């Protein structure tokens, strides 16, 4: 799941604003970033993913490193956007039927009900599966499994040691196994 030799040319071209390069980088990372945010139960995970890539676009000129470092850098940004969104949510709880909801053009026009329902089911299924995990365990599982990050990359993103990530992953897998056995 890497770009390999195509990464360096794509990064260089993205730094000078080449549209094809942005498409390559976005297609490569959008799914894992969105999955990571969705796995955390972010209500507006697509918006957060967009904010993440906007921040990537703003800061790409200063990025130096290989493909693994780039992936880690993108996930650090996504993780920070998630934390910011949670802080914002706690400061301003949503109100049902608020004027903001009524002014939202997507809500007025409707959307793809089937797509919305499937996204909600998938999100609820992931949330239910991850429910027995602590926040740190959930972070590790989402970064390692959904985002495909290495132990070292996950440690860097979360600001933890490699050993701490391994322990969290082991404990998370054990908790998930116990939960699966309890449902069988």
Image: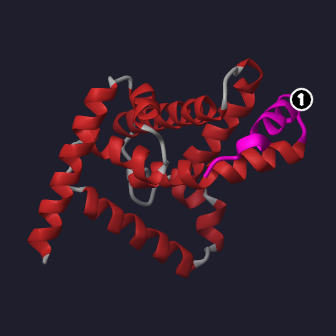
Vertical comparison of 98 with 135: above or below: below
Vertical comparison of 28 with 165: above or below: below
- Stretch in magenta: 1-18
Coloring scheme used = secondary structure
**Mark 1 — residue?**
16
Dot 1 alpha-carbon crowd within 10 angstroms: few under 14, some 14 to 19, many 20 or more: few
Left or right: where 67 falls relative to 43:
right
Question: Where is residue 58 drawn, in percent x and y?
Answer: 73, 27
Q: Nearer the viewer, residue 129 or 51?
A: 129
Report which quarter residue 124 is drawn in.
bottom left
Question: Where is residue 34 drawn, in percent x and y?
Answer: 54, 52
Query: What residue is shown at x 59% (from left), y 34% (from top)?
Result: 68
Left or right: where 45 falls relative to 12:
left
Res. 125 in view: yes
Question: Where is residue 136 drawn, in percent x and y?
Answer: 27, 37
Question: Where is residue 172 drawn, in percent x and y?
Answer: 22, 48
The majority secondary structure of the magenta stretch comes to: helix
The residue lying furthest to the front in this view is 5
């Amino acid at each position: 799941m890497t770009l390999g030799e195509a990464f360096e040319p794509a990064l260089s071209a993205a730094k000078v604003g080449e549209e094809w390069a942005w498409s390559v980088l976005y297609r490569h990372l959008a799914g894992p970033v969105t999955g990571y945010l969705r796995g955390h139960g972010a209500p507006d995970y697509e918006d957060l993913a967009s904010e993440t890539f906007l921040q990537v676009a703003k800061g790409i000129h200063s990025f130096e490193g290989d493909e693994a470092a780039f992936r880690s850098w993108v996930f650090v940004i996504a993780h920070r956007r998630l934390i910011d969104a949670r802080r914002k949510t706690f400061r301003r709880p949503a109100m049902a039927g608020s004027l903001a909801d009524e002014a939202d053009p997507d809500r007025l026009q409707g959307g793809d009900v089937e797509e919305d329902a499937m996204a909600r089911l998938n999100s609820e299924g992931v949330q239910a599966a991850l429910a027995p995990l602590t926040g740190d365990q959930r972070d590790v599982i989402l970064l390692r499994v959904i985002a495909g990050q290495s132990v070292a990359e996950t440690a860097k993103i979360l600001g933890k040691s490699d050993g701490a990530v391994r322990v969290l992953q082991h404990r998370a897998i054990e908790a998930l196994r116990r939960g699966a056995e309890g449902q069988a």
